[in-house]
Image (cartoon, helix red, strand yellow):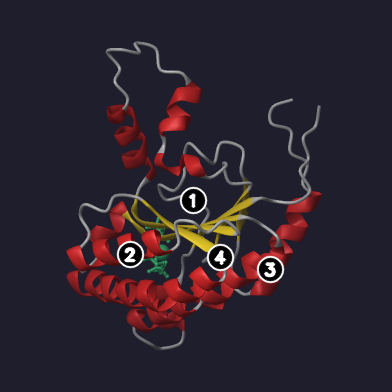
Amino acid sequence: MSVNKLKPNHIAIIMDGNGRWAIEKGLERSEGHIKGYQNIKPIVMAAIKSGIKFLTIYAFSTENWNRSKEEIEFILNLAADVIDKESQELNENNVKISHLGSKEKLPKDIQEKIHRSEKLTENNNEFFLSVAFNYGSRNEIVETINKINLSENNYLTEKQFSENLSSNKFPDPDIIIRTGGQKRLSNFLLWESAYSELFFLDVFWPEFSEKDLTLVINEFSKRKRNFGT
Ligand code: IPE
Ligand code: IPE
Ligand code: MG
């Protein structure tokens, strides 16, 4: 049986290439992050228009803490601005926003902003946006295992594991897009991507457009998904 779903339901995006976009233009890396953050809203809107229901965006990884203090601070400030600025409009579009990853290491003000935007949009059900911020898939996996009381369940099944993953409110991604030209997952959705269709685009995230998204969705509709059959 071939399960060729013509239309994707969940797209996940590794928003990579902000720094290189800026350097190529003779700008500071921080300019690339500004441009990158500005590109989030139009792409969320394009995703809503495209008919998918779920979008996950990878904005900051657990390994990104290894960057310079200045760059981290810059990104955290941008994120804080964007959460406040965009939550209202996304709420008006009936978008439910959720955070994926660990809130613990994040500054208190960002934790509160995330909490506020999740609370504001909690009853929305038209479109589901998950923002992976301070997210790492290995961390997610270990946290999940620690959450399950193994002494009571001495054999952990795949189903039980999946149900306990924090990403489990979303179906597995049909499509994973990575912008910026690198062909790797960089600790993103390692479990959930088991049968995702992967798209590696040469365009840097600040220039990723609705047109690129449409091309990916068209290309996806031509792929044959076998799921091992
Ligand atoms: C993605 O762009 C944003 C984050 C990872 C926070 P980069 O900052 O990784 O940009 P490049 O890959 O160095 O160009
Ligand atoms: C992946 O990009 C993480 C995000 C886009 C948030 P990186 O730039 O951190 O990945 P590597 O270091 O090139 O693998
Ligand atoms: Mg990068």
Mark 1 neighbour density, 10 Å: few (under 14) some (14–19) many (20 or more):
few
Element type at mark 1: loop
Residue 82 to residue 10: above or below: below
Residue 123 to residue 2: above or below: below
Q: Quadrant of the C terminus?
A: top right
Q: CA distance from mark 2 to mark 3?
A: 26 Å
**Is tag 4's residue or tag 1's residue first in the polypeptide sequence?**
4
Question: Mark 2 — residue?
Answer: 116
Residue 184: mark in rendering = 1
Residue 94: mark in rendering = 4
Mark 4 touching mark 1, by CB under 8 A? no
Q: CA distance from mark 4 to mark 2?
A: 16 Å
Mark 4 neighbour density, 10 Å: few (under 14) some (14–19) many (20 or more):
some
* Total labels drawn: 4
Q: Callout 1, which amino acid? A: Arg
Mark 4 touching mark 2, by CB under 8 A? no
